Amino acid sequence: MPLIVWDSPLKTPPPCCIFLAMESRGGRIPGLLFHRPVGILPRSMDALLDIRNLEVRLALREGVVRAVNGVCLQLSPRRTLGLVGESGCGKSMAAKAILRILPPRGSIASGEIWLAPREADGSPVDLAQLPANGKAMRRIRGSDISMIFQEPMSSLSPVHTAGNQIAEAVRLHQSVTRAQAIDRAVEMLGLAGVPHPEQRVNAYSHELSGGLRQRVMIAMALCCRPRLLIADEPTTALDVTVQGQILTLIRRLQQEFSMAVLMITHDMGVVAETADEVAVMYLGRIAEHAPNAALFARPRHPYTVGLLESVPRLGQDRTKRLHAIPGHVPGPFEVIAGCPFHPRCSQRIKGVCDTGEAPKLREFEAGHHVACHLYPAKEGAA
Ligand code: SF4
């Protein structure tokens, strides 16, 4: 009789719960012991993307960096989730883990990344379990999930025209002729607001302005109508007018294509304008997660409060110094006991915040989650 250790978020295994793999993430386990069921259906799949306890490690020569540390996120169809935080807090690593394009020394140490099926009768798939370069993952990249990178100049090929690059993405996922793929490229460039798309389809990236290059990237990302668009700092390299145009364009195309958007940025202004919900990251963890209006009206975590106070405001006394969060982001190999933000937090409680485990993300008010000892979980919340 096999011994089964049930280590799943599911309360009761569904009838279709067949252990698809007999391997735990820690290593192969002999046939009689299942440490963790792999490849089962998640509890509910209302969300398009459901990330559970994601841990990403970078094995560097100097040591192991815990780039993403127990992140849980859900993203519903047609919604925008803003993921914010300082550079190096793990936002982009989390996004790359979803697409399974982590750098060579990066790996998913544990966690689940469930993607809802395209068809109503299909099954969700755990992206964390798929081989990064396997057929299934290559099919998902581009056709189900696409990504816009922050620097279009280095993301676009300098030796291929805009049209050829978009057409290549189309032909990877659809069986169309080259001429049809180029027609699709022209159509997408037009949708992305590129003027004279039939001419620009033959342009190289160095012949385009920064704003046009970003529009080409957007056209390329959306050419196969993905269900989820990951926009990683899509406006960082652009001036403020073009920034506004690109955000409006992403919003328009999101509605047109009924996409969900994961907007990764360090700019609170971008998030305020675009996101339905906001998750604030610090040192690889989610510090606060709330609906947009609640987060900006009543930020709770001292780190979120600090970030919002650092944003310059119109009409602000120009002789006053801008607020800055004291201290600095710890080095990647620094181990901090207790709350990872405590060395910089003006509200830290001695003997509580600086010892033991990091505080868990708990629901403090309906839909408002905070990882801070100042905010206990609301009654009945996990
Ligand atoms: Fe500050 Fe303590 Fe809250 Fe961390 S847990 S943010 S140190 S008050």
Image (cartoon, grey):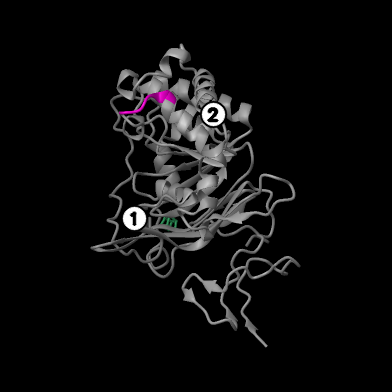
The residue range painted magenta reads 159-163
Does residue 315 appear in this view?
no
**Position above or below: 133 against 4:** above
Does residue 201 appear in this view?
yes
**Position above or below: 108 against 2:** above
- The span from disc 2 to disc 1 (Cα, nearest Å) is 34 Å
- Location of mark 2 (residue): 177
Left or right of 32 in this view: 241: left
- Location of mark 1 (residue): 104
**Position above or below: 96 against 207:** below
Q: In the depicted view, which residue is nearer to us: 302 or 144? A: 144
Does the magenta run of residues contain 168?
Answer: no
Q: Give residue 258's quadrant in the image.
A: top right
Helix, strand or loop status at disc 2: loop
Residue at (40% x, 29% y) in the render: 235
Q: Which amino acid is tagged 1?
A: Pro
Q: Give residue 255's quadrant in the image.
A: top right
User: Dot 2: few (<14), some (14–19), or many (≥20) neighbours within 10 Å?
Assistant: few
Q: In the depicted view, which residue is nearer to us: 300 or 19? A: 19
